[in-house]
Structure formats: structure tokens, C-alpha cells
Image (cartoon, rainbow, N blue to C red):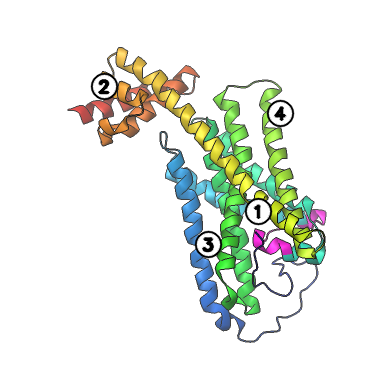
């Protein structure tokens, strides 16, 4: 599905190598102000939606809100700034634009695969920093999906902010439409998918306690898939924007590319949720046999019947199962487990 959007006649570079000519519009900000405000609202709401969905997916072991905020900030600030710095130092064309604008940018200046690789590299640095600094939180495949997806959502937020800023300067903010809404939606989805692919590969390293070459090659492979997917995605935009090739076939391929990463993300999340249910089924019965939690709680969790467990106890039960798993791996202590056991006992009184 090709998106028809109202865009500026030429890309606007926040950090131009050559000085851009002065805007041709006077009073531009006032003319497009209401449209830009609508665009800001759309961006904020969609970003909140991505974060909410990823937060919901991690139902059994919620990540701290402060850490998720750091991941979003890293994706929205650190990764884009690093991308611009690296691109300026290496002479690579500016790439921090929303996916919906890549078609025009690529049509005017040609494909920019190096920019896609730089973007994924800078997002990967942020995700890797979270991985290294959070050994207890970032310890599974689903954790990687959540952190990587949120970093990607933050990056999409920054790209959309650049686009809205460009619209406000050119006076075309009033052209914001349903097409732009879906463009921003796909921007967030694709960037979340790109980031989640690399994050999942990092999480799997701790999930399966990989060592040696496997601990390196899996993340390298995850990054390669994300970067190549991103570069191919942008190349499709270049072909469509330039008007070369069979337009119907290219539009169909682009539609598949729009949703392939999202489909992969759904598959990964579904697998990870099933795997996490297996963690509950493995460790909670052990806790019950040792007399730390009621048998009926462990049985209900193992069978997926959370509705029969008091709501106040569910999160602590899940945390207890994963803490026991971390204890087995040398990443937790008995004192931590005891905290969750005490909380569960308090609910039962």
C-alpha cells in the first residue's frame, strides 16, 4: 500500500552540510500550527500505544517504569544524536526522517543504505548499554523484545518530531492527514520491529546461557538481520519514490515489508509468553512443595488459571518464579526470594 502524503518540496536538514535556502513561506508557523499540533498529538499517542503494548506483553515479569523510560529516552535522544554525529563525521547523508518521508528523500537523492546501518548501529548501542547495565532485568528473550522495541519506538518518535518541525518551518503543517497518521504508525511499528530483533538476540544469550562464539554470533546475526531489513525497506521507498520499475509489484512488496517485521515481532512475543508460562510451571510447584506458597496458587499458575489466584498475589508469584530462575543462574539471592514469599503470605492472611 503506497502512502500519499503531503510533504515539503525538499528535505529539511536540522544539521545541514550546506546552508539551506531561507523558507519561501512567511507566517508559516501560524499557517500550519494547528496541523502540527495535531501531528504532535498523533505522535505522542502512538508512541504511548507502542510502549503500552510492549509493557502488556511482558505480563509475568514487569520491567521497572524508570528503566523503560530510560530505554525510550535513549531511543529518542541518544540514538538519533549519535546517528547525526556519525553521519556528519563520515559524510553519510542525513537519514533521521520518518519512514513516510523516505520515499521523497530517496527519490530526490537516491537510496541511503549506509544511513540505515548507522541508525541500527546507534540503536544497538543503546540496547547493548541496557543489556550490560541490567543483568537482572534484561535476562530473557521477551525482555530483549521489550527493551529493543521501546528504543525503536523512541527513535521513531524523534524522526517524526523532525518531520513535524520541518512541516512547521515550511508552513505545510495544515496538510497533515490520514496518510500521515498511517505513515507515523508504520514508522513506529517498523522501528520497534528493527530494535526488537536485535534486543531479542541479546536476550536469548542470557535466556539460554550461551557462551563462547555463540554469545557473539547470535547478537551479530540479530543486528545484521535488523540492518539489512532496514536498508531493504528504505531501498523499496527509493524505487517507489523514483517511479522506476513495476509500481504495482513494488507497492505490494512494500506492503509486505511494512508488516513482515511486525509479524515477526508478534511471533517472537507469542513464543516468549509461552516460554515464560513454562517458567511459572517449573518453579512455582517447587516453591509449593517446599511450603513457601499455597499449592493451589502453584497449580493455578501452572495451568494458566490466573483468575483463581488473588489479584494482589499474581505479580509476586510471577516475580518469585523468575527470581528462583535467576537464583539458579547465580543472579539472585535467597533474601530476594523471601521478599516475594512474604508478600504472597500477606495476601493469604
Point out the tag, 2 or 4, that comes first from the N-terminus. 4
| Magenta-tinted stretch | 88-103
* Viewer-nearest of discs 4 and 1: 1
Mark 4 lies on residue: 217
Residue 89 colored in magenta in the image:
yes
**Label 1 neighbour load within 10 Å: few <14, some 14-19, many 20+:** few
**Mark 1 element type:** helix
In the image, taking residue 246 as reference, residue 304 lies left or right, namely left
Which mark, by number, is residue 43? 3
Q: Nearer the viewer, mark 1 or mark 2?
A: 1
Q: Quadrant of residue 250?
A: bottom right
Expressed as whole percent of the image width and height from the top left, the position of residue 211 reads: 65, 20
Q: In front of the other: label 1 or label 3?
A: 1
Label 1 – label 3 distance at C-alpha: 21 Å
Residue 260 in percent (x, y) is at 63, 45
Q: Which residue position is annotated with label 1?
A: 255
Amino acid at each position: 500500500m503506497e502512502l500519499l502524503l503531503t510533504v515539503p518540496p525538499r528535505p529539511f536538514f536540522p544539521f545541514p552540510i550546506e546552508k539551506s535556502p531561507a523558507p519561501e513561506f512567511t507566517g508559516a508557523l501560524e499557517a500550519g500550527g494547528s496541523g502540527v499540533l495535531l501531528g504532535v498529538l498523533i505522535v505522542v499517542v502512538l508512541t504511548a500505544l507502542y510502549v503500552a503494548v510492549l509493557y502488556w506483553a511482558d505480563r509475568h515479569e514487569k520491567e521497572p517504569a524508570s528503566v523503560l523510560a530510560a530505554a525510550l529516552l535513549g531511543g529518542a535522544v541518544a540514538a538519533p544524536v549519535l546517528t547525526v554525529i556519525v553521519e556528519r563525521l563520515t559524510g553519510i547523508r542525513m537519514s533521521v526522517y520518518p519512514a513516510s518521508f523516505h520515499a521523497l528523500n530517496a527519490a530526490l537523492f537516491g537510496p541511503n543504505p549506509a544511513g540505515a546501518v548507522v541508525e541500527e548501529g546507534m540503536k544497538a548501542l543503546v540496547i547493548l548499554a541496557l543489556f550490560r547495565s541490567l543483568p537482572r532485568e534484561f535476562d530473557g528473550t521477551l525482555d530483549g523484545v521489550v527493551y529493543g522495541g521501546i528504543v525503536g519506538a523512541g527513535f521513531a518518535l524523534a524522526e517524526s518530531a523532525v518531520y513535524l518541525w520541518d512541516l512547521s518551518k515550511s508552513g505545510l503543517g495544515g496538510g497533515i492527514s490520514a496518510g500521515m497518521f498511517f505513515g507515523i504508525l508504520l514508522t513506529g511499528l517498523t522501528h520497534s520491529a528493527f530494535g526488537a530483533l536485535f534486543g531479542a538476540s541479546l536476550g536469548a544469550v542470557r535466556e539460554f546461557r550461551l557462551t563462547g562464539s555463540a554469545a557473539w554470533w547470535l547478537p551479530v546475526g540479530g543486528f545484521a538481520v535488523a540492518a539489512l531489513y532496514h536498508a531493504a525497506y528504505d531501498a523499496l521507498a527509493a524505487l517507489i519514490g523514483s517511479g522506476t520499475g513495476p509500481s504495482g509489484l513494488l507497492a505490494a512488496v512494500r506492503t509486505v515489508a511494512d508488516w513482515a517485521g511486525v509479524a515477526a515481532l508478534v511471533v517472537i512475543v507469542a513464543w516468549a509468553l509461552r516460554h515464560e508460562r513454562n517458567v511459572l510451571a517449573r518453579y512455582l510447584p517447587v516453591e509449593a512443595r517446599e511450603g513457601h506458597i499455597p499449592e493451589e496458587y502453584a497449580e493455578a499458575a501452572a495451568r494458566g488459571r490466573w483468575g483463581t489466584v488473588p489479584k494482589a498475589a499474581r505479580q509476586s508469584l510471577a516475580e518469585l518464579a523468575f527470581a528462583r530462575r535467576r537464583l539458579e543462574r547465580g543472579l539472585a539471592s535467597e533474601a530476594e526470594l523471601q521478599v516475594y514469599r512474604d508478600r504472597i503470605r500477606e495476601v493469604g492472611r
